[in-house]
Image: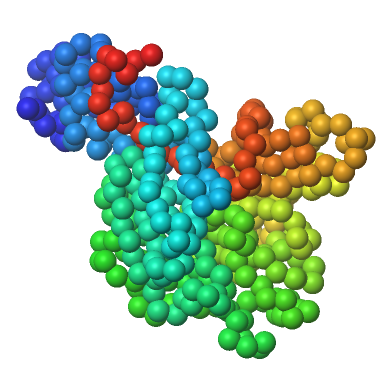
Amino acid sequence: MTSFGRLPRSSAALPPLEDENLLAEILLLLPPEPSSLPRASVVCKRWHRVVTDPHFICRFRRHHRRNPPLLGFFNTDRGRISFQPIMEAPNRVPPGRFSLQIDDGDGFKLLGCRHGLVLFLAYKRKQVLVWDPVTGDQHSIDVPTGFYMITTQIQGGVLRAAGEVHHFQVVLVAAREDDKEHRQVLASVYSSHAGVWGGNPISAPLPPEAYTDGHFTGICICMPSVLVGDSLYWPLDGNFASSSYILEFNLERQGLAVIELPVEEDTDLTAMRAEGGGLGFLCLSESDFSAQLWKRKTDGDGVTSWVLGRTIELDKLLSFNLEEGRQFLMISGFSECNNVAFLKTQIGPFMVELESLQFKKLFETTSLWHPFESVYVVPAISKQLIL
């Protein structure tokens, strides 16, 4: 069979659609939706041969790694992990397609999804589990020394390096209180390529405001990490005197930082990629039922500041009647590649595309949403798969 990895020099001798190598390059540009390759496979035998080749499928997934569709989300409810699709037919993935058998007695906690991988923390086993729902691959990894499973709040994130298909990294972060004067955050990075955690945990002190009223400040367990550039971000949860904070772990520098935000404590927020690039955050206001999009800017002297980009009037967008009484509003998930916020409200849950402001009402669920963005290729591409 012809290899689709590189173009031979003689490829120009054939018309583009008859040269399988050039055809592969063209088909590589199909949108990364679940129905794309099945539809292409029924055009003719040549197209079927190209799009069902394992090397082409691997390239297709790698090519679209940074612009995957939002297939749906995982949630946990009463010890069960379930996948809920949100795309319409013919791109809708069956709910039972992504299933994982786990022992609830191990105390599994879903930490988040990224780059087609799902990350769990198993408290009793003192391990993290990395799962690829598309391929079914699983990797169990012991939690590194220094992360005390009982007394420490643990969060984490999983990701692949650009262009990677097989190897991945896991970042665990934790807030720890050695005593009233020493409260810090820790981080450790696991590389599947090396098969080990990277030395001693990286640490950074929590801000002085974290020491108020004897309340232990930790990493918010209600929001998964968000990847912006080379850094992962988590909201900090604590009894701060005035401001809110987010925790940054920079993958390139292997360093931790605590960043102050220009909003009051207890504000419901998530980090996000700002409009135009760079770090931003989304926060909600129940008082006027709005969402604010902020962006961090750096001037010529290297001084950073926060600038309010725009405000979304959710009461008008979602047709709320604020006169009916106090409305409930919170962020329950965020899709970083597709820039979609999942919101819980008094009249039900919604997903809102922050750029187009298109929204969709979802079904009720009692837990957080962990958006799953991935390039899903139907296991058996055939005519029967085309609806």
- Above or below, 250 relative to 343: below
The colour scheme applied to this rendered structure is rainbow
Does any portion of residue 283 appear in the rendered image? Answer: yes
User: Residue, x 62% and y 41% (percent of image)?
Assistant: 365
User: Residue, x 79% and y 44% (percent of image)?
Assistant: 328
Count every numbered label the image shows and give the total.
Answer: 0
Q: Position of residue 233 (x, y in %)?
A: 55, 59
Q: Report the front residue among 161 and 98.
A: 98
User: Residue, x 15% and y 34% (percent of image)?
Assistant: 6
The quadrant holding residue 385 is: top left
- Above or below, 251 relative to 223: below
Report the residue that reaches farthest toward the right.
323
Q: Quadrant of the N terminus?
A: top left
Q: Quadrant of the C terminus?
A: top left
Q: Report the front residue among 318 and 131.
A: 131
User: Residue, x 33% and y 61% (percent of image)?
Assistant: 140
Q: Position of residue 146 (x, y in %)?
A: 45, 80
The quadrant holding residue 63 is: top left
Q: Position of residue 143 (x, y in %)?
A: 39, 71
Q: Is residue 107 left or right of residue 223?
A: left
The quadrant holding residue 135 is: top left
